[in-house]
Image (tube, helix red, strand yellow):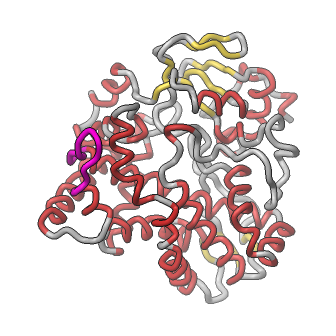
Amino acid sequence: MSAQLDVSRWDPSDPAFRADPYAWYGALRRDSPVHYREDVGWVVSRFDDVEAILRDDRFQVATPSPWREAVAAATSPALGLLGEHSLLFLDAPDHTRVRSAVSGSFSRSRIARLRDQVSATVDHLLDQVDDGEDFDLVKAVAEPLPTLTVTSMLGVPDADWSQLHSWTVDITGFDELPIAWDKLAAADAAATEFKAYCDELLAERRQHPGDDLVSALVASTVPGGGLDDDEVVALLMLLLIAGHDTTLSLVSSGINVLLEHPGEAERLRADPGLVVSAIDELLRFESPLQVASGGGRWPTEPVTMHGITMEPGTPVRLLLGSANRDPDAYEAPEVLDLSRQGRPHLAFGRGTHFCLGSVLGKLEAQVAIPKILDRFPHLTRAVEKVEWRPSFTVRQLTGLMVRP
């Protein structure tokens, strides 16, 4: 189908593209691997090019002042704070300093200790729906699981998860390509409420520290100095947003893909040892984040690729979802193969800004997806067609009605 598509007519706001982007990705990779749109910037779609830019120090993530000021002019300081101090928008040395303060909490050994807790949470969520009736897998499992996991790490009540989830949805709602300006007011209000929640939480942990991530951040001292309150609040927001969106998408779209490929689902049921490569293949096949996170990459000097020069001042958008379906990187990329080996996918990025929570997201999916398949051996979709969130940046189901 991509052979029939004219890339000059590609519109990232088109609902048809957002529902199924892969044919357009193929056309971009073939005909315009470095593509320009005034409302988006430069768009890079091939695997090798995306990976190279992710590793290239000439491309930074800190958004130039005029772009930040356009948002700041219409919002309160709280929303700007979450952007100014987020790891997604920090370059070295600040990125190194802030990331080092929290990286130990996301090491493989620390995350491995959460397996039993994640397993118990999944069992509890599944127990609520195991009655033979159709249910929405997004609402029942994929949505609450990552937020409950993070609330446990932060040491806040499980009852807070619904409010935290609501703030996350509102704060990320405007972060689209092009920017969804109509959702900026809701994002601003949510950011203000979230900051007040965090300010109170930090004050409480200073008085009564515990064995939790918030207490560790409050007490952190790292090379170059400890974190200030604004940096801690921005980190907490990032952990909620990144941990929530990626895992929600991975669990729900992963199950959806397996229901569309019942032979592969049976392979996973029959061979639990397949789960590690299976989750990586699901991340490649239906990448939760379609565009590299943050405000794009910003060249610090003119950079030429495929005969096209990308100048400073214009953002470069890296299409992870396209790169992970690139036939020059993967044999038969449109085929789901849970035992696939070879080049690691780009779903979590590369280089300095490789996703901090990747190990946690994988663990949650490695636990949740096999449990869902085992609990419901005859699981099918209860609807003929699923609905995707109308987003360019995120590949996420709005719901997934299933029949046990």
Q: Quadrant of the C terminus?
A: bottom right
Q: Residue drawn 59% across and 21% down?
A: 42
Image location of residue 297, percent across then percent down = 51, 27
Q: Nearer the viewer, residue 117 or 143?
A: 117
- Does residue 396 lie above or below 31 as drawn? below
Image location of residue 184, percent across then percent down = 36, 39
Q: Quadrant of the N terminus?
A: top right
Q: Residue drawn 51% across and 19% down?
A: 299
Q: Residue drawn 35% across and 74% down?
A: 158
Image location of residue 106, percent across then percent down = 45, 58
Dominant SS in magenta: loop
The part of the image, by quadrant, that contains residue 12 is top right
Image location of residue 81, percent across then percent down = 27, 39
Q: Is residue 260 left or right of residue 146?
A: right
Q: Residue furthest left?
A: 207
- Does residue 337 lie above or below 131 as drawn? above
Q: Is residue 148 left or right of residue 85?
A: right
- Does residue 365 belong to the magenta stretch? no
- Does residue 319 lie above or below 216 as drawn? above
Q: Residue furthest front?
A: 223
Q: Is residue 193 among what the camera can see?
A: yes
Q: Magenta residues, as a range?
A: 218-230
Q: Nearer the viewer, residue 110 or 250?
A: 110
